[in-house]
Image: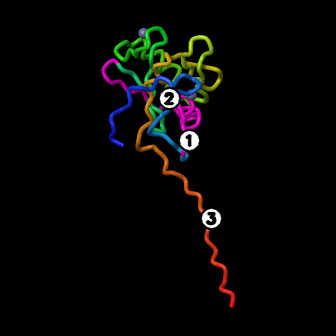
Amino acid sequence: MGSAKSSSGKTAGICEHGLHWLKAASPEPGERVCALEYLNRYVAPRRVDRLDRRGTELYLVFDSGEKLECCCETCGESHGDDPGFTDDIKDVALGRRALRFRLEDKSGHLVVWFARGDHLHLHRNALVRFHPPRRSRTRPTRSVRPAHTPPATE
Ligand SMILES: [Zn+2]
Ligand SMILES: [Zn+2]
């Protein structure tokens, strides 16, 4: 912990989707998840609680606390300063449950699926930049086998 982030991740640490493993989020000991797997396992089917803007960056904030940057499919950046961009995202996502996160086969971009088949196209940067919030990290599960002390035989 506290070590400088590794800049070398060329072959090691890349999943089948071409994403880095999330370091902070190991829900089960020894298990690695990428951003896409994390979203599907631990965020879906959470509701988009609000949109958060930081400068030009625009995020979906789920009621579980995770934030996903709304990276424009065309250029890979988010446009929080563009009311049209923001309204389009609000329209499809706000207050709704994200049921599934998928990668498009051809483009490798991210598609967020909501109920009734509505979906939101985002650039894969949304996944590349995704970091789970530390506070939501679940405590490692414990596997307990209660000890039984056999009665002393004499
Ligand atoms: Zn992956
Ligand atoms: Zn753009």
Sequence order check: which comes first, mark 1 or mark 3?
1
Highlighted range, magenta = 30-56
Give the quadrant of the N terminus.
Answer: top left
- How far apart marks 1 and 3 lie (CA) works out to 22 Å
Relative side of 1 to 122, left or right:
left
Point out which mark residue 31 bears.
Answer: 1
Q: Which residue is mark 2?
A: 12
Q: Of tags 2 and 1, which is closer to the observer?
A: 2
Q: Residue at x 54, y 16 (%)?
A: 109
Q: Quadrant of residue 41?
A: top right
Magenta region includes residue 46: yes
- How far apart marks 2 and 1 lie (CA) works out to 15 Å
Q: Which residue is mark 3?
A: 145
What SS does tag 2 mark?
Answer: loop
Q: Quadrant of residue 15?
A: top right
Picture coordinates of residue 105, whole percent (x, y): 62, 15
Sequence order check: which comes first, mark 2 or mark 1?
2
Q: Amino acid at mark 2?
A: Ala
Q: Quick one: 95 or 57, which is closer to the camera? A: 57
Q: Residue at x 64, y 74 (%)?
A: 148
Res. 76 in view: yes
Disc 1: residue Cβ within 8 A of ligand 1's nearest atom? no
- Residue reaching furthest to the right: 153
Q: Amino acid at mark 3?
A: Arg
Magenta region includes residue 95: no
What SS does tag 3 mark?
Answer: loop
Give the quadrant of the C terminus.
Answer: bottom right
Picture coordinates of residue 124, whole percent (x, y): 50, 18
User: Alpha-carbon neighbours of circle 2 within 10 Å: few (<14), some, or many (≥20)?
Assistant: few
What SS does tag 1 mark?
Answer: loop
Q: Amino acid at mark 1?
A: Glu
